[in-house]
Image (spheres, rainbow, N blue to C red):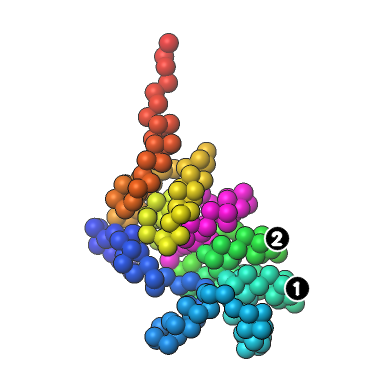
Amino acid sequence: MEFPEDFNQLELLNSHGHLIPRGASSLWTGSKDEEEEVEEEEGDHSEEWYGEKEETLKDNPKVLILWAAENQRLATVHRLLTADPLLVHCCDEDGYTPLHRAAYSGHVDVVSALIAAGSKVNPRTIDGWTPLHSACRWSRVTVASFLLQHGAELNAQTNGGLTPLHLAASHTTPFRTDSPHTLELLLSQRHLKPGLRSSSGETAGEVARRTGPHHVLFEMVEDCVNVVPSRE
């Protein structure tokens, strides 16, 4: 799919971010009733509710492990992977793996279990998102740190040229209290390339200046880039 030169993927995220597949949402067709069901699933539920949900999915282990990874059902994830280790590599129709789901939802214990079971650290969705992109889009700073420690591609770019830093810099996540922490984590990485541009031509710093109050954090890297070694 081709986009015009002035296409801004981050602006599309701002206006249509709620449509990004997350958790079990990519399993639904998008009707109002189904959207309400997804919202309900994201709240707190009893152990009985989770047990009933798992029972309804027991005959579809691929769907079950995606759901379990999203909902922090660690014992279920372990059980499924013991029965079929290859489930760690499964994905939904949008290319989201169990690792994407756990990263998106901020479940570092599930992320750790999946990687220990052989999950690739940098699988790509059909839009080119890695689990680190997902973690940074939703300010899951603990997960982002864990992924980086286990080989996540710091400067990976989506099909639209967005890096994890671009997504962390866009001040649109509902978890805004963690936004500066995610930015600080990424900006402190030695091999960060803050000058990478999206398909719309923006750097992450320019996105931050356009969308929120945390652009001052980019001085961490700007000062380093602008330092001229002394010739004395």
Q: Amino acid at mark 1?
A: Thr
Q: Relative to residue 84, is residue 161 drawn left or right?
A: left
Which residue corresponds to the image point at 34% horizontal and 69% vertical from the top-left? 16
Q: Number of callouts in the render?
A: 2
What residue is drawn where x is 37% and y is 59%? Answer: 172
Which residue is at a point 37% across and 40% down the rendered structure image? 216
Secondary structure of residue under mark 2: helix
State the extent of the magenta-drawn residues as a range.
Answer: 127-156
Nearer to the camera, 202 or 138: 138
Q: Which mark is residue 116?
A: 2
Relative to 212, residue 58 above or below: below
Does the image show residue 114?
yes
Q: Quadrant of the C terminus?
A: top left
Q: Residues within 10 Å of mark 2 (few under 14, many from 20)?
A: few
Looking at the rendered structure, the secondary structure element under dot 1 is helix
Where is residue 91 shown, x and y percent of the image? 56, 73
Mark 1 vs mark 2: which is more N-terminal?
Answer: 1
Taking the magenta stretch, the answer to whether it contains residue 145 is yes
Location of residue 5 in the rendering, given as x and y in whole percent from the top left corner: 25, 58
Near mark 1 (Cα within 10 A), the count class, few <14, some 14-19 or many ≥20, is: few
- Residue position for label 1: 82
**For residue 223: magenta?**
no
Q: Is residue 64 rendered to the left or right of residue 31?
A: right
Q: Amino acid at mark 2?
A: Ala
Residue 68 image-quadrant placement = bottom right
Residue at figure coordinates x 40%, y 31% from the top left = 223
Q: Is residue 200 above or below residue 187?
A: below
Alpha carbons under labels 1 and 2: distance apart: 12 Å
The tag on residue 131 is none
Q: Nearer the viewer, residue 22 or 231?
A: 22
Q: Is residue 85 visible?
A: no
